[in-house]
Image (cartoon, rainbow, N blue to C red):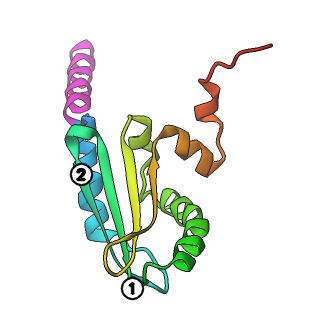
Amino acid sequence: MIKITQIAFVFAAVLMLVSCKNTKQKIQEHVATYNTSSSIKGSNITSTAAKAFLSENKIEIRIETNLEETDENKQTYSESFPDLLKGMIDNDQISKELIEEGVKFDVYFLAYNNSIIAQKLIGQEELAALTGSGSADENKVTAKL
């Protein structure tokens, strides 16, 4: 009985070690999954793609549209961009787990000529602001008067 328990424990330990992935592997896996299965719905969105920058622990997401780069479009989509980002977080297109490991998501909303209509770099503080959670604020120390 003791021998079976020891073998089971060793097997479980080996399985845990083999299944652990480092952050860079998780980034690559997330980008591959995003590029093969993610779609963002919108009337003007033509395509989306993710790219990994492993040395910077960053994932760039480009959302391409058929829109023109005008002040009106910049204003309109800058206001609605946070809602799009919240939806991407809810759908795990922007991974909370990776952000908690220090990965940043640089998301671009682009006009048809690749000029930037809206852009946001999402790290832990930005994630907390977008989702309304206080996790980034819990670690802050403020001066008291």
Residue at the spot 38% in from the left edge and 74% down from the top edge: 39
* Residue 1 position in % (x across, y down): 27, 16
What residue is shown with label 2? 52
Secondary structure of the residue carrying tag 2 is strand
- Identify residue type, mark 2: Ala
73 within the magenta span:
no
Residue at the spot 53% in from the left edge and 76% down from the top edge: 71
Crowding at mark 1 (Cα within 10 Å: few <14, some 14-19, many 20+): some
Residue at the spot 25% in from the left edge and 34% down from the top edge: 22
- Vertical placement of residue 65 versus 105, above or below: below
Magenta part of the chain: 1-18
The C terminus lies in quadrant: top right
Horizontal side of 79 relative to 1 (left or right) equals right
Identify the image quadrant of residue 20: top left
Q: What's the CA distance linking mark 2 and mark 1? A: 24 Å
* Mark number displayed over residue 100: none
Q: Nearer the viewer, residue 97 or 55?
A: 55
Which numbered disc flags the more N-terminal residue, 2 or 1? 2
- Vertical placement of residue 110 versus 91, above or below: below
* Residue 60 position in % (x across, y down): 32, 56
16 within the magenta span:
yes
Crowding at mark 2 (Cα within 10 Å: few <14, some 14-19, many 20+): some
* Mark number displayed over residue 66: 1
Residue at the spot 30% in from the left edge and 53% down from the top edge: 30
